[in-house]
Amino acid sequence: MTSPPRSLAEIQRRVDEVKRFLSNTLSIANAHTVEFYTHDVWQRFVAVSPHEVLTRVRACSDQQREPEHKTTEQPSTTFGFCSSTSRLVDTDELLQAAKAHSLPGLGVCMSRDELLQALSGDGGGKAAVLEPDEFMNSKKSHEVQSMSEVVACLAQHCRVQQVIDVGSGKGYLSSFLSLQYGLRVYGIDSSSTNTHGAQERNRKLKKFSRVYQKHSKAARTRGEASKSPQEDVIKIRAGVKGEDGGGTVTKEEEEEEEEEEVSISCPDISSAVERHSEPQSETDELFLSALSVDLVRTTPTRVPPTQLSDEERERRKRENLERKAKNRTDSSVTVFSPLTSYVTAETELRELIDELEDAVMVGLHTCGDLAPSTLRMFVAKAELAAVCSVGCCYHLLSEEFDPARQECLHSACGFPLSQYLRHQSWFCGRNARMSACLALERVSVGQGIQMESLFYRAVLHVILRDHYSSFKSEKRVGNVYSKAKSFVDYVRRALRRLELDESKLSDSDIQEYHDIYRPRMDEMHAFNMLKVALAPCIEGLILLDRLCYLKEQEDLSFSALVQLFNPLLSPRCYAVVGLKSYERKCSS
């Protein structure tokens, strides 16, 4: 393995740089949009016009920064903020500083290709044969395919066969790792609904694979077939719906399929056959036999449970148990095993997984504190050889040094993770962490923020302040915007949701508020674009803290931040990767 791209001291210096920048700018990220008008946020923080901010943001996004022409003497500034008033006076200076203090600007990340080259020495793992687009949407397909190759290379480098997928959800990554790379994967999720969904999805994947194999064999036998695969298809049923693609069922299998019918076009299967009509590879065989029998059961002739005799019920129960026992003794079958459990850094993995061996721990978009818990678990458990963690939902992180101290009184907090930041008692604040979830790359190409809904909510807050004493009620307005036909309708729906007396206000009273604040909507738009510009810096500090934590450990040979995904497809695109330093016992 090559040496780590950055030392602990270098990462600490980068942390200090981002901290200094955020110390001057975090007040903007922590300003709550709901209170934008009630707290006169624009006047408090910004001394330039909304038009100037929007123009400079647009120019910066287009990388067409105009030369500065400062004809008058400018006040002393720090990152664009006036040193005496702490208000923004130089938008260009702020935007350029924000770019410099993002992860790309700091130069601390490896690319995915660089990591694969370092792990395997040949630029990557084996090429994918199973097309994930058949089973998931383009975003999930991109994430799963990109991450699974990295995980497979980590497993190969560490000479392990087991993967533990924390926060596995519906099992997209786990299934692909098992089917494509022959790894034994344990998917752990706290939601029993997700675990059941993962089991159901595995069953449907198996069903699709059977049809795929039949058509592949038929295409190879016929060569240039005289009839199309569509003619062999009798009914399309119970495939993998929605994000998961589709599947077909032949006449012989019709009696075994589920009742639910879906509409999938036959040309999808035809094109799959054309793409994969070469001689069947070992991966094709793996695709067919990968799923455990207890997860993929052939449905017998359908008889309502109430019509089954006691003997028949016992027979079916016995057969299911026998299938499970057979699977447990068949070491040639690669399995994805979904498990339901709430995990923390203190979780004993051997209590969840009887067959636990040395393994790679992964997490794809683990929410809130689960991502730092994954890293803590990796450090604490000797059986974990490597980790690849992609976090998300920074607003759900608990902060140890939040003055409110409501989030982590009885457990380890998610931020800060490193001793370096903990010794400095650093905290971001919930609104800043919420801002970190904004997607700069998507906003830059026009996939912007829904400004009207934010505007409606901020003006509603003015109405609540002026006419109701409970405008700080713990009740939430929720998503009433999507159902509202107008601002008046929005306010009335919100008042009913908050259980407030809507008869206090006439429609004209409500509309008047809209008309008064509508000319100031550009202020909110411009302010939110400043938040978007700061988002990568806040995310960067959170991720640098996690990397710093790994580099503080003595028994790691490698740790890095790696950009795994295209941020336009998947905004939370960075993985924290770590490898233990000792030689794996598998080599003996």
Image: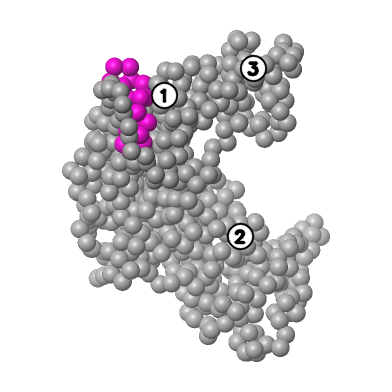
**Mark 2 and mark 1: Cα distance apart in space:** 49 Å
Secondary structure at badge 3 equals helix
Badge 1: residue crowd in 10 Å (few <14, some 14–19, many ≥20): some
Alpha carbon separation for disc pair 3 and 1: 25 Å
Question: Per the image, is 81 magenta?
Answer: yes
Above or below residue 530? Residue 359 is below
Choose the circle earlier in sequence order: 2 or 1. Answer: 1
- Residue 127 lies, in percent from the top left, at 43, 72
Give the Cα separation between the discs numbered 3 and 2.
46 Å
Looking at the image, is mark 3 or mark 1 nearer the viewer? 1
The mark found on residue 513 in the picture is 3
The amino acid type of the residue labelled 3 equals Tyr
Q: Is residue 466 above or below residue 208?
A: above
Q: Which mark is residue 244?
A: 2
Q: Nearer the viewer, mark 2 or mark 1?
A: 1
Asked whether 120 or 539 is in front, the reply is: 539
How many C-alpha atoms fall within 10 Å of the one at disc 2: few (<14), some, or many (≥20)? Answer: many
Task: Give the residues in magenta.
Answer: 80-97
Q: Earlier in the sequence, mark 3 or mark 2?
A: 2
Q: Residue furthest right?
A: 307
Disc 1 designates what residue?
Answer: 48
